[in-house]
Amino acid sequence: MSESLMVNRFTTGEAPKRLRRVLTYGTFDLLHYGHVRLLRRAAALGDYLIVALSTDEFNASKGKSSFYSYGIRKEILESIRYVDLVIPEENWEQKIDDIKRYEIDVVVMGSDWKDSPRFDYLKDYCELVFLDRTDGISTTDVKRELKE
Ligand code: C2G
């Protein structure tokens, strides 16, 4: 093919589209449809979805313990078509570093976190979106119902 015909986005001056990067946080234990609907909608906000997954140690510091270990929860999340990368959530303070390191455009959480001081300050660093929580399902409810 002659040089003149080898036209591509660089010769046409079209800058390559920058990927819009989305970040969300959570424990995602005993994955259920509320989590999946959150991840699907979060992924639809951009081109690349990163999940910062609470480590077992971080959960312990919150007085929480998950049924599945971090490794298992990570393996399950990485199998989901909506998720592009899973990173550890080790503390409450890492979010600004995460946003800078991964060049995040939008942080998204379920509406139970709306107006929380744990997230509100992030609006100075990136877009902050809260999606309606899926009613009628929670990991706590599943655990309780399984015990009954
Ligand atoms: N979620 C939802 N609908 C449900 C249950 C959960 O939309 N029925 C959302 C939550 O709002 C959250 C995400 O799914 O955005 C993950 O939920 P959890 O695993 O319960 O996460 P959480 O314990 O809220 O941890 O630093 C913040 C924490 O890591 C968030």
Image (cartoon, grey):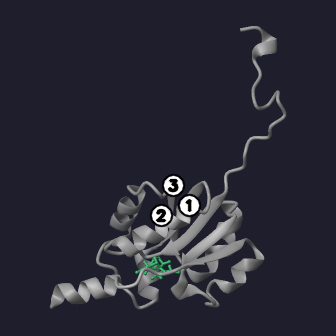
Q: Tell me the residue at 59%/73% (across/down).
A: 108
Work out whether mark 1 precedes mark 3 in sequence or the reverse, and give the earlier one. Answer: 1
Mark 2 sits near ligand 1, with its Cβ under 8 Å away: no
Q: Tell me the residue at 60%/54% (across/down).
A: 47
Q: Quadrant of the N terminus?
A: top right
Which residue does the numbered mark 2 point to in the structure image? 40
Mark 3, other Cα within 10 Å: few <14 / some 14–19 / many ≥20: some
Which residue does the numbered mark 1 point to in the structure image? 44
What is the C-alpha distance between the residues marked 1 and 2?
6 Å
For residue 60, say whether it is visible: yes
Residue type, mark 3 in image = Asp
Q: Are marks 3 and 2 in contact (CB under 8 Å)?
A: no
**Which mark is in front, 3 or 2?**
2
Q: Quadrant of the C terminus?
A: bottom left
- State whether residue 93 is above or below residue 23: below
Which residue does the numbered mark 3 point to in the structure image? 84
What is the C-alpha distance between the residues marked 1 and 3?
12 Å
- State whether residue 41 is above or below residue 27: above
- 64 on left or right of 16: left
Coordinates of residue 43 in the picture (x, y in percent): 54, 61
